[in-house]
Image (cartoon, rainbow, N blue to C red):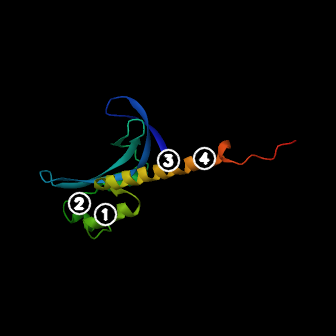
Amino acid sequence: MKYELVFTNDGRPHVGVSIGTVYQDIQDIVYKTDTIELFNLVYVPRTEEFMFNKNIRLSRDLVEYYESLNLYNSSFLERTHYTSRRDVFQELESIGIMPASDVDSLIHSYRELAAQKEGVKQKIISFSHPMGRPEKNKAR
């Protein structure tokens, strides 16, 4: 897990946990653009908030490459190895970058892992608690 200092909606700094990178497809018909924007998804345990920021843990070149693609017209296909817009999205997902619209599934997975971790922790505590173990033979 990667921890980072974030400012929540209340304007106060808190320690957050970086969950992963997500992408959003941003379309603008006025300017004829269809671009990808990458974000880091962060969970703040103290406030139980999930938020996005730009502290992406990928190489700057990779971020710039994906964010510079204009998927609006098919001319990007001639300059790249992609055969369709969907290929770009599938490539992002294949390297672990999920669509921002699927954040709910990432949040659910995170909470499920946290619950499993807490369950294991409680088992360890109950197993190691002196009341739960048989006493060793005492010297007479």
**Mark 2 residue type:** Leu
In whole angstroms, how far apart are the C-alphas of marks 3 and 1? 27 Å
Pointer 4 residue: 126
Q: Earlier in the sequence, mark 3 or mark 4?
A: 3
4 shown above or below 56: above
Relative to 80, 139 lies left or right: right
Secondary structure beneath label 1: helix
**Mark 3 residue type:** Met
| Res. 9 image quadrant | top left
**Mark 4 residue type:** Ser
In whole angstroms, how far apart are the C-alphas of marks 3 and 2? 33 Å
Q: Earlier in the sequence, mark 3 or mark 2?
A: 3
Q: Residue at x 74, y 46 (%)?
A: 135
Work out which quarter of the rendered image holds the C terminus and state it: top right
Residue 96 in the image: state x and y as whole percent. 40, 59
Pointer 1 residue: 88
**Mark 1 residue type:** Val
Q: Earlier in the sequence, mark 4 or mark 2?
A: 2
Tag nearer the camera, 3 or 2: 3
Find out whether the residues at labels 3 and 4 contact each other: C-beta distance under 8 Å. Answer: no
Find out whether the residues at labels 3 and 2 contact each other: C-beta distance under 8 Å. Answer: no
Pointer 3 residue: 1
Pointer 2 residue: 71
